[in-house]
Image: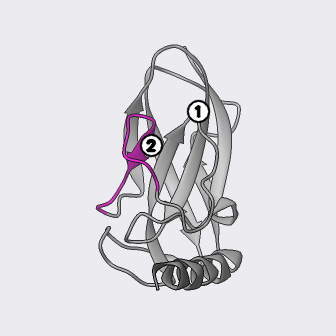
Amino acid sequence: MKRFFLLVSTLLLSAAAQAASVSFVEPADGATVPTTFPVKFAVDGMDVKPAGELSPTSGHHHLLINATAIAAGEPVPFDETHIHFGKGQTEATVTLKPGTYKLTMQFANGAHQSYGPALSKTITVTVK
């Protein structure tokens, strides 16, 4: 039964994600930023809702630091490189040490299950 639920959940996640897209409002890809900088997220075709609310057309943002998009239906890890915005936030202030970083925005449902690469966006920033 668990496998069936996971399969159905993954199919629903994939269908919803195909009709939507995410983007970084700020910073721009290739930007040079200070050690503390604003990050702003956008999503089209889905509603931003706090974690816990389950709907095939809503979810919340996650910021992955030097990590790639997460497969549809897989949970977003809870660690220092996977920042959760489970209150439905669309912007945050991030602090990173100087260096070059790959930032991946990952949209996921209320149970923190990824909508997959279709609802992710990756940029590169240089922190000075």
**Magenta span has 59?**
no
Q: Quadrant of the C terminus?
A: top right
Mark 2, residue position:
82
Residue 80 occupies quadrant:
top left
Disc ID at residue 37: none
Residue sitting at x 54%, y 85%:
4
In the foreground, 22 or 107: 107
Picture mark count: 2
Magenta region's main secondary structure?
A: loop
In the image, is 126 to the left or to the right of 48? Answer: right
Q: Earlier in the sequence, mark 2 or mark 1?
A: 1
In the foreground, 1 or 52: 1
Q: Secondary structure at mark 2?
A: strand
Please give the range of residues in magenta.
Answer: 76-87
The residue type indicated by label 1 comes to: Asn
In the foreground, 17 or 123: 17
CB-based contact (under 8 Å), mark 2 and mark 1: no
Mark 1, residue position:
66
Task: Please state the horizontal and vertical placement of residue 84, each as a whole percent of the image.
Answer: 38, 51
Distance Cα–Cα, label 2 vs label 1: 9 Å
Residue 42 occupies quadrant:
bottom right
